[in-house]
Amino acid sequence: ALVEFKRGRTVQFQSAFSSRPGDYVLVEGDEGEDMGMVVHSWVAPSNSPPVVNNSLNSNKYDTKSAYDYLTGDPIYPKVIRHASEKEVQYLHNAQAQVEIKCAEVARHKVREHRLPMTIVDAEYQFDRKKLTFYYDSAERIDFRDL
């Protein structure tokens, strides 16, 4: 399944169950769990690269994966389960508000440290174990002072 996250970031996942485009699912994230919306799904043998509809813009999707060092087969992270309605509401309401506040704090820190950059957005992994800031800058930024 191709799962889309905030800001259009789309990643390929292996799923043991059927999902339709528009379904929200919990997936394996960086050291935890994340939630996103299924944008494309198909049936393919386990750990085999799928044949994706040619109408999809291949540059938009991150289909990189780890590889089994013995067989060379791709190993995709897994879809864990469908998200509940309560979890989807949390993602769109409470978590979205926290992300807005995080971006505001980051903008304040950028001004405080006079960094030549603009904070565009903030995105929490669903389980809040990882926070990603999206930024724009015309030059390389040294983050060590932050």
Image (cartoon, rainbow, N blue to C red):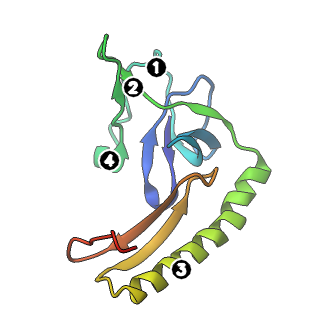
In the rendering, at what x and y percent does residue 96 appear? 63, 67
Mark number for residue 58?
A: none
The residue type indicated by label 2 comes to Pro
| Number of other residues with Cα within 10 Å of mark 4, as a class: few under 14, some 14 to 19, many 20 or more | few
Rounded to the nearest whole Å, what is the CA distance between mark 1 and mark 2? 6 Å
Please give the name of the residue rendered at 38% of the width and 32% of the height, measured from the top-left corner.
52
Camera-nearest label, 1 or 3: 3
The residue that label 1 is drawn on is 44
Tell me how far mark 4 sits from mark 3, CA to CA: 35 Å
Whether residues under marks 1 and 2 lie with C-beta atoms below 8 angstroms apart, the answer is yes
Query: Is 55 on the left or on the right of 15, as rendered?
Result: left
> Number of marks in the image?
4
Q: Which mark is residue 57?
A: 4
Q: Nearer the viewer, mark 4 or mark 3?
A: 3
The answer to which image quadrant residue 101 occupies is bottom right
Q: Is residue 128 above or below residue 121?
A: above
Outermost residue toward the top in this view:
70
Mark 1 is surrounded, within 10 Å at the Cα level, by few (under 14), some (14 to 19) or many (20 or more) other residues, namely: few
Query: Which residue was labeled with disc 3?
Result: 105
Disc 4 versus disc 2: distance between alpha carbons? 15 Å
Residue 22 at x, y percent in the picture: 61, 47
- Which comes sooner in the sequence, label 1 or label 4? 1
Q: Are marks 1 and 3 in contact (CB under 8 Å)?
A: no
Amino acid under disc 3: Val
